[in-house]
Image: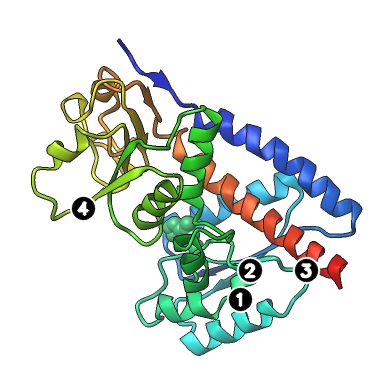
Amino acid sequence: MSAELIDGRLIADYYRERLQESISELKANDVTPGLAVILVGDNHASHTYVKMKRKACSKLGIHSELYQFQESLTQEELVGKIEELNELDHIHGILVQLPLPQHINPITIIETISPSKDVDGFHPVSIGKMVTNQDTFYSCTPLGIIKMLEYEKIDIKGKHVVILGRSNIVGKPAGQLFLNRDATVTYCHSKTANLTDYTKKADILVSAVGKAKLIGAGDIKKGAVVIDVGMNRDEAGRLCGDVDFESAREAAGKITPVPGGVGPMTITMLLYNTVKSARWQLENRQKR
Ligand code: GUN
């Protein structure tokens, strides 16, 4: 039996259509959602991601502004730019593309962004609210995974979710979002002994480690849902995930491909958070 495919592009389109309606409503109230994107240095992947994010904004009628700086930008200069953007009413979201050059502390930079414009969901205020199960901006990839499962009507409550990877951007917040929905969560990482003992017990397996072909059929419980967050290159230089797709689909019940799985959902959730921020701002203005 071969697993059913979870089509990230199709699901992303579904959510983008819903967003289009919210954007029209905002525009009827004279609000155009606005995103400021900051890019420092010349990391090739970062340039590609930023281009994709801005193109997605433009397609939906979200205003975006790019602030591009040389690698030599100082931390103080970057802090100053973010403080300026924090004050601008037409900017609802501020995204600083990571990684930053070595001489800039990402924690200081993330903490400079106003929590009300933290559309990446990286600020400690956003993280704290997430952990205490309050409404906030949630990190885009984890939120995209949850929205995918909701679309597919896959139950989370009471399920055993195994997360591979403990990054601040994906692994840790993904586990927390599942916990908030009453899953039992196990985190595995590079120091986990006997990894397969855990992966085989997962009803929902999320892999976000960045290792091609880490997971195959022998690591998966029959019928499990497999979510592949990996973005790697195989021997032929083709984009691939952490999961050996052809092998894993023989054991999994449902599986996301790479490309065309989680990736389109991540960008959609950035748009979602930007629209959410614009709506919050409008609601606060209407209350006054
Ligand atoms: N670098 C890799 N992923 C991300 C992301 O989701 N947001 C930002 N700002 N930088 C990243």
> Which residue bears the numbered disc 4?
189
Q: How far apart are the two marked residues, 4 and 3, measured between alpha carbons?
A: 41 Å
> Which residue bears the numbered disc 3?
90
Q: Secondary structure at mark 4?
A: loop
Query: Is residue 208 shown above or below 12?
Result: below
The image quadrant that residue 226 belongs to is top left
CB under 8 Å between discs 2 and 1: yes
Query: Is residue 256 shown above or below 191?
Result: above
Query: Which is nearer the N-term, disc 4 or disc 3?
Result: 3
> Which residue bears the numbered disc 1?
114
Label 3 neighbour load within 10 Å: few <14, some 14-19, many 20+: some
Mark 1 Cβ inside 8 Å of ligand 1: no
Q: Secondary structure at mark 1?
A: loop
Q: Is residue 220 visible?
A: yes
Q: Position of residue 254 (x, y in %)?
A: 38, 24
> Which residue bears the numbered disc 2?
117
Give whichever of 202, 106 is nearer the camera: 202
Image quadrant occupied by the N terminus:
top left
The image quadrant that residue 119 belongs to is bottom right
Q: Is residue 139 left or right of residue 25?
A: left
Query: Is residue 189 shown above or below 221?
Result: below
**What residue appears at the point 51 percent right and 44 percent down from the top-left corner?**
144
Q: Secondary structure at mark 2?
A: helix
Query: Which is nearer the N-term, disc 2 or disc 3?
Result: 3
CB under 8 Å between discs 2 and 3: no
Image quadrant occupied by the C terminus:
bottom right
Q: How far apart are the two marked residues, 2 and 1, measured between alpha carbons?
A: 5 Å
Query: Which is nearer the N-term, disc 1 or disc 3?
Result: 3
Give the residue type that dot 3 points to. His
Query: Which is nearer the N-term, disc 2 or disc 4?
Result: 2
Q: Is residue 134 left or right of residue 99?
A: right
